[in-house]
Image (cartoon, rainbow, N blue to C red):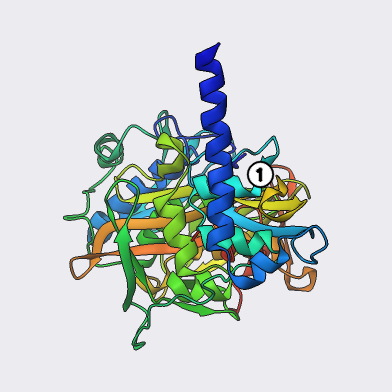
Amino acid sequence: MRKVNARRYAVASAALGLAAGLFAAAPASAAAAATPSAQGSSGDVEFSVFDNGSGIPRNSSFRLADLGRHGVPESAVKQLGAGKAPRTAGADAESHVMSGPDDLVGQWKDRDGWTVYLRRGYYDPARDRGFGLTKIEQKHNLTMKAVRATTQYPRPGAAGKQQMNGRPNTYNYFTDVLHVKCSGWWIFKTCRVDKVQAVRAGVDFGAQIPMLPKGVITAYCEGVQGRCPDWVKNAINI
Amino acid sequence: MSRRPVRPARTLPAAEWWAPLLVDLGAVQYGSTDLGLCVRDVDLTTGRARVTVQWSGTPGTPGTELLLADPEAGRDVLLREIAAAGPARLAADEFPPLTGHAWLLDELGRRSDAWYAYLAEPVDLLRVVTDGHGTTDVAVQRTARGDVVVVHVPLAGLGDDDVGLAYTIAERAVTVPPHDLRPAGTVQGRPAFTAHLPGEG
């Protein structure tokens, strides 16, 4: 009995500590909003997150404050608690000197440590031809960050990264982006996933362009002809 | 949750059953162009791969038809079957100088997700037929509409900058305006139409 009580005490203390920490760390606007009468902190909020495999519940509700355990920055949780849209990165921060479609504009390690290259590419809407970042942005309304997240946080196991031809050089990555709606008060809002969009990225790893792979051919929302919804690229954890 | 191939390849669960075959045929076509080989027709309509190969210098001949029991048997087996009918070899390395038709076979095989995950409307790749010099026709079944659109793909200059063309072909089949379609008889008993790629023809 004593053990059970001790555990309950520890859990309650941890919850209070989290709330206290958030109170203490909250910006003035959020702290001021932490009253029952405050506007904003009791409103509904919507946002999206890439499913990074941390177990964000899809079929049950969860607390907004729990998002901190799923890789969402504390500052974003607090902003959402205050009824504000967290700042998202928007355009990718990297700056690129543009000169040709095969220019490398990004490279990173995927889930398994493989180097993924992203080229500037091109997109010609009249001919519906293109590849690389330009097509990804202009045709599919995605960003380099969204592609990077897709390759770094694909679905678990083999299902998230699959070979597409008999030679081990073309792969598809799959991940899910979760659209979340929350209602209630401040960081104690109750949240629920209300939409899931699968995102796919196709990557060629075979060396083609002097010693380097072509890299990301394209990325798109499954079953969505053309532009992905804005909430996919605006996910708060990429 | 994710879309899956209509009929997955045995060894590649995310690829359509014909994808490995097209990539392997691309490799044989790359390696054998200067031997006169033309992979004239890849017919997938029956659910088994029926491949017709021809060699230049024998004009008017109908070509040799191969019924490939296992589209995933690998390029060595494929080469043996084709070489039994005439001269053929594999590409000397992974990326030999491109030829348009070989490049297109390879592109279609690498990106079979274009046929089951890319579009809202279901489509299926039925057939890839080339005239041997300027054009390859890609027959796309529009499953829900019960018809077939044959997309003409000009081969001149096809290559690395056209990577992703498989998506363009699949999307063209479902977005081509009706006034740009030309009747072309039937394929598999379904009404067929021809169409050019966007910005072509």
Look at the numbered disc 1 and give the secondary structure of its residue: strand
Task: Judge whether A235 appears above or below A161 on screen.
Answer: below
How far across and how far down the image is residue A181, in percent?
73, 52
Task: Judge whether B159 appears above or below A148 on screen.
Answer: below
What's the amino acid at mark 1? Arg
Is residue B126 in view?
A: no
Residue A141 occupies which quadrant of the picture?
A: bottom right
Q: Quadrant of the N terminus of chain A?
A: top right
In front: A111, or B143?
Answer: A111
Question: What chain letter is assigned to the residue under label 1?
Answer: A
Residue wearing tag 1: A63
In front: A79, or B155?
Answer: A79
How far across and how far down the image is residue B200, in percent?
58, 78
| A184 horizontally vs A82: left or right | right
Residue farthest to the top? A1
Q: Give me the residue at 65% from left, 39% from top.
A: A58
How far across and how far down the image is residue B2, in percent?
59, 41
In front: A65, or A139?
Answer: A65
Q: Give me the residue at 70% from left, 39% from top.
A: A61
How far across and how far down the image is residue B152, in percent?
57, 66
Task: Judge whether A100 appears above or below A11 on screen.
Answer: below
| A219 horizontally vs B159: left or right | right
Residue farthest to the front? A2
Q: Report crowding for label 1: few under 14, some 14 to 19, many 20 or more residues within 10 A (C-alpha).
A: some
Count of number-bearing discs? 1
Is residue A53 in view?
A: yes
